Image (cartoon, helix red, strand yellow):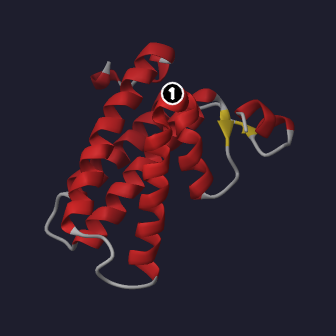
Amino acid sequence: MSLKRWADNGWLRPHKTSAKEVAGLLAIVERDLVDAEGEISAAWRFGIAYNAALKLCTILLHASGPSVPCSTTERLRHCHWFWGNERKDDADYLETCRTKRNAAEYEMAGVATEKDAKELVEFVKDLREDVLNWLNKHHTELMPRKAK
C-alpha cells in the first residue's frame, strides 16, 4: 500500500519537520550507537540499536511530510518505500529484529546474541549513512550543519 493511499484513508497526518527535529533524532541515533557498543548485555545492545533504526525511519517519514499514527512495526515497514523494492530485504530484516527485540525484552533472556547485536549495529551505521545521503539529496534544508 502506498503512502498516498494511507493518506487518503486518513492513516497519515501532515507533519512539517525541521532541521532541529532531524538533528534531535540524529542525536538519539548517535547516542544509541555509542550505547549499543557498550559493556552491557547483547540483548540490551540489540534493543538500543533497534531504537536507533526506528529513529532513522522516523526521520525519513518526517522529512517526507506525513506522520504515521501507528505502531513501531508500521514505521519500520514503511522505511523501504523511500528506496523502493531494492530495500525490501532491509525492511524484512528490521521486522525480524523487531520480533527478536520484543522477545528479548518481554519473553525470555538469551534471544539476541552477540552476533545479532553486532550485526544490527553495523546495519544501523549503514542505514544512517543512507538516510543522511537521502536527506542531502532530497531535503538539504533538513541536514544538520556538521553532516552536510
* Quadrant position of the C terminus in the picture: top left
| Image: 103 above or below 57 | below
Q: Position of residue 64 (x, y in %)?
A: 61, 28
Q: Which residue appears at 34% of the width and 36% of the height?
A: 128
Q: Amino acid at mark 1?
A: Trp
Q: Position of residue 94 (x, y in %)?
A: 45, 52
* Quadrant position of the N terminus in the picture: top right
* Number of numbered discs overlaid on the protein picture: 1
Q: Position of residue 40 (x, y in %)?
A: 19, 71
Q: From the image, tell me which residue sits under label 1.
A: 83
Dividing the picture into quarters, in which one does residue 46 lie?
Answer: bottom left
Residue at the extreme right of the image, as rendered: 9
Q: Which residue appears at 27% of the width and 61% of the height?
A: 116
Q: Position of residue 140 (x, y in %)?
A: 45, 16
Dividing the picture into quarters, in which one does residue 110 lie?
Answer: bottom left
Q: Which residue appears at 26% of the width and 64% of the height?
A: 45
How many neighbours does mark 1 have within 10 angstroms: few (below 14), some (14-19), or many (20 or more)? Answer: few
User: Quick one: SS at disc 1?
Assistant: loop
Q: Which residue appears at 43% of the width and 42% of the height?
A: 90
Left of 52 or right of it: where is 35?
left
Residue at the extreme bottom of the image, as rendered: 108
Q: Is residue 2 or residue 58 the one in the foreground? A: 2
| Image: 135 above or below 78 | above
